[in-house]
Amino acid sequence: MAKQKKYLIAPITNDDIESLLCFLRKFFFRDEPLNRCVGLLDEQPTSVDFDKYCVETIPDGFSLKAVSPSGDIIGVCLNGVVNRSDDKEEMECIDPKFRITQDLIDKIDIEADIFGRFPDVDKLIEIRVVSVDEAYRGQGIAKALLDETKRIACENGFQMIKTDATSHFTALAVSKLGYKCIYTLNYADYKDEDGKVIFTPEAPHTCVKTLVYQLN
């Protein structure tokens, strides 16, 4: 007899924003290697810019949450829509620590050049954040969120799913699900104007990878 899952996968809506941010501040904001490296929350309870970066995917309608029987969020997968025709707008940052990370994200976006590499792809789902409550890890929740992302992407005619994995463990997890790495930037090679390495996260986080899953 199959073991019944003790959680439900559901869409994230605007009504979830407060509880979503509480979850992210408790887990992802502090767990993510680059956030830890720059001390994003060392002197403040949250980052307004990172809050904005996370919640701006919600109106697209494809972000997902895993919910416990008591109604608590125990996992999230924040998914945004990216179209070839989109005008790339630089995000305005007031938090200098997040600005450092955003500069890296912008560089990856340019150098990975998704639409240049894949001329037949016109729209894709971008996974921005995958995070699970540490008390529920090892129960397949991240995989369930990623599987549901794949299902709804197919159902809605998307041609690709893409993620920039700043964590070794995230890259490993999506690779096991069939995602292919198309771009890698070693943190040791990413330097400022004076030649100083900008990010020195703890091992085994040595690089950021752009990974994609082609749907058709």
Image (cartoon, rainbow, N blue to C red):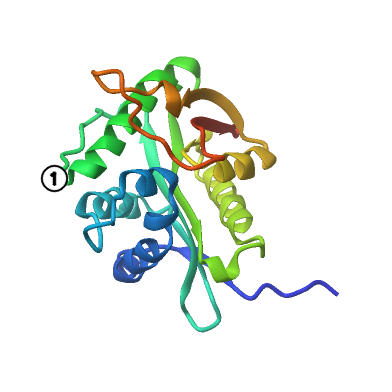
- The correct choice, above or below, for 72 with respect to 184 in the image is below
Instruction: Mark 1: give few (<14), some (14-19) or many (20+) Cα within 10 Å.
Output: few
Residue positioned 22% across, 49% down in the render: 49
Q: Quadrant of residue 8?
A: bottom right
The quarter of the image holding the N terminus is bottom right
Q: Quadrant of residue 122?
A: top left
Q: Which residue occupies the foreground of this view, 186 or 129?
A: 186
Residue positioned 50% across, 19% down in the render: 118
**Location of mark 1 (residue):** 94
Could you tell me if residue 84 is visible in this image?
no
- The correct choice, above or below, for 13 with respect to 114 in the image is below
* Left or right of 56, for residue 115: right
Residue sticking out furthest to the bottom: 70
Could you tell me if residue 207 is visible in this image?
yes
* Left or right of 77, for residue 2: right
Q: Which residue occupies the foreground of this view, 5 or 200?
A: 200
* Left or right of 200, for residue 162: right
Q: Amino acid at mark 1?
A: Ile
* Left or right of 57, for residue 143: right
Q: Position of residue 133 (x, y in %)?
A: 51, 66
Residue positioned 50% across, 20% down in the render: 120
The quarter of the image holding the C terminus is top right
